[in-house]
Image: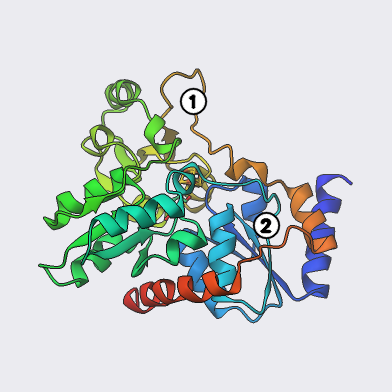
Amino acid sequence: MNKTQLIEAIDNLRKEKNAVIMAHYYQTGDIQDIADVIGDSLALAQKAAQTKADIIVLCGVHFMGETAKIICPDKKVLVPDLNAGCSLADSCPADEFEHFIKQHPNHTVVSYVNTSAAVKALTDVVVTSTNARKIVEMLPKDEKIIFGPDRNLGNYINSVTGRNMVLWNGACHVHEQFSVEKLIELKKQYPKAKVLAHPECKSVVLKLADIVGSTQALLDFATKSDEQQFLVATESGILHEMQKCNPTKEFIPVPPADSTCACNECNFMRLNTLEKLYVCLRDESNEIVVDKETAKKALKPIVRMLEMSK
Ligand code: 13P
Ligand code: SF4
């Protein structure tokens, strides 16, 4: 099948099966273009909670599919490539995190959504990069908090809220890769450009940013801004929607260190393709399964997040 036929076939299947296609901003442009919903991690969770579809095809990584399945246990949740994992989620194995929690009694456990269902089951409230600051600020000032697994996001939240959360030492291999030297060079080359950075980046990169935020926040900032040029320090998939919403503005990806590539792509996110999306919808394959007991425990902190994000 050529691309046009593939798009038509996916379109027919989604109508026939009452399926909804949801895509994260880090997916390839062709997947974002065919999706019914595109968004950041928070938007995907919120839309999953509202959908009337029987099948959710979650074009993103495994933890996003798990989150949708936990929210919608009666729906079939499919991910085009089940190997689409996440180095940040992998940096926090549930048994080690449980031990860490035991070492810090009387702490509220706040976990970033980039975690396995088993880690969410150990958590009091889940957050995403969109609502992390707001949710932490909603907790009483004297509350002792464990934050996992992203040390950069945790450090950033500590710095803007004045909290002293105990941090799990995890990170995303994509966002930690941005080169400060190349960013400084780009700032010289584009002196008027605004720097947009995701809070999973290292603090040396965040210090150079005009705005630090989730993919949605960065997109909104660029769209509202009167500036014409933007240096983007997050996974380069977001440039597709940024360019689509702002055809006259220029978006320049910040390159990773130790690479000749201009863009920084998440190898896990890029495992999903249009072809795999078609096959999984046709065969209803690659279904996300979450053990019932774990799902029940993991649902509570996700619902708490959705409530606190209203
Ligand atoms: P957001 O979708 O919350 O911006 O998160 C970025 C990310 O790394 C998702 O894997
Ligand atoms: Fe995980 Fe990083 Fe890829 Fe996001 S970009 S899915 S945090 S590895």
Q: Residue furthest right?
A: 1
Whether the residue carrying mark 2 lies under 8 Å from ligand 2 is answered with: no
* Residue depicted at x 89% and y 46%: 1
Asked if residue 37 shows in the view, the reply is yes
Q: Secondary structure at mark 2?
A: loop
Q: Residue at x 37, y 66 (%)?
A: 123
Q: Nearer the viewer, mark 1 or mark 2?
A: 2
Q: Position of residue 258 (x, y in %)?
A: 44, 18
Please state the horizontal and vertical placement of residue 217, each as a whole percent of the image. 36, 56
Between 58 and 292, which is closer to the camera in this rendering? 292
Vertical order, 236 against 211 (above or below): above
Left or right: residue 174 versus residue 129 is right
Q: Is residue 223 among the parts visible in the rendering?
A: no
Residue in the image at 48% along x and 32% along y: 264
Residue at x 54% of width, y 57% of height:
63
- Image position of 192 with respect to 196: above or below: above
- Look at mark 2 in the image and give the residue it sits on: 79
Q: Is residue 260 above or below residue 60?
A: above
- Residue type indicated by callout 1: Ala
Amino acid bearing label 2: Val
Quarter of the C terminus within the rendering:
bottom left
The residue identified by callout 1 is 262
- Mark positioned earlier in the residue sequence (1 or 2): 2
Q: Is residue 215 or residue 173 the one in the foreground?
A: 173
Find numbered disc 1 in the image and state the secondary structure of the residue it sits on: loop
Question: For residue 68, what is the image quadrant?
Answer: bottom right
